[in-house]
Image: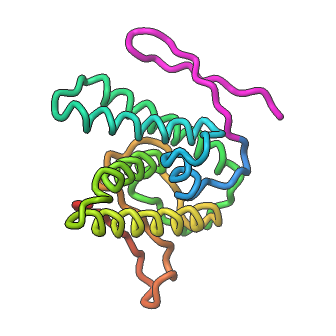
Amino acid sequence: MSSPLFTQVSLFGGMLRVPGEAEPGQPLPDAGPFLRVFAGAEEPATLMLRAGRACLLLYQQVHRKGRDIPDSVHEELSLLVWLINREATTQLSTVEFAPDAPENPTSYGEIIAWLSFKYLRYTLNQADPTHGPREAAVLLAYCKALDQLVVDVNAGLVRLPEQLTEVMPPQMVRPKGSDPDGALQATRFDGL
């Protein structure tokens, strides 16, 4: 196994060395590993999974404090999304993308951060007969869309942006030709 690479990050007026763990050629994880970590069924085995869990912990902090959250929470979330994106870029560095592969409007890190938010909403409302079934359905639909996006990206049919896009709520596209009418499909998660 190669030694981890470090990236110098300017943060809060100082420099921070951030280790990278991803190896080129590793497939991008779908929703399953993140959900198992969020549920506490597994410990996060990679930097990407640890960053995903940290996103969940930040959203839990936001839920507890309400609107009185410090700006540092937004900065921390941006850093976690950046870490996930960097790891995803490394993992996908050996994927040969189709020349006409569309770029997804939202980065993988932003999609995973939104997954942690949707998971938190589900856990907070699962016992509520009014909102629980809806939150479960929303989480399931989001997981299915994420899983399909990961299949398409790992196959080189859809590209991911390497940087934050701030396209929220997240959007996920399907490659051209995946729909019977041949149109580019985008799934937008408005109000979810």
Residue 140, how many percent across, how many down? Answer: 42, 67
* In the foreground, 123 or 172: 123
Q: Quadrant of residue 12?
A: top left
* In the foreground, 21 or 152: 21
From the viewer's perspective, tell me whether residue 11 is left or right of residue 21: left
Does the magenta segment cover residue 14? Answer: yes
* In the foreground, 158 or 141: 141
Instruction: Tell me: residue 137, above or below residue 46.
Output: below
From the viewer's perspective, tell me whether residue 26 is left or right of residue 128: right
Residue 26, how many percent across, how many down? Answer: 71, 50
Q: In which quarter of the image is residue 87?
A: top right
Image quarter of the C terminus:
bottom left
Colour scheme:
rainbow
From the viewer's perspective, tell me whether residue 169 is left or right of residue 76: left
* Residue at horizontal 43 percent and vertical 30 percent from the top: 79
Does the magenta segment cover residue 6? Answer: yes
Residue 68, how many percent across, how many down? Answer: 17, 27
Image quarter of the N terminus:
top right
Residue 78, how many percent across, how many down? Answer: 38, 33
* Residue at horizontal 50 percent and vertical 20 percent from the top: 9
Instruction: Tell me: residue 189, above or below residue 59.
Output: below
Q: What stretch is highlighted in magenta?
A: 1-22
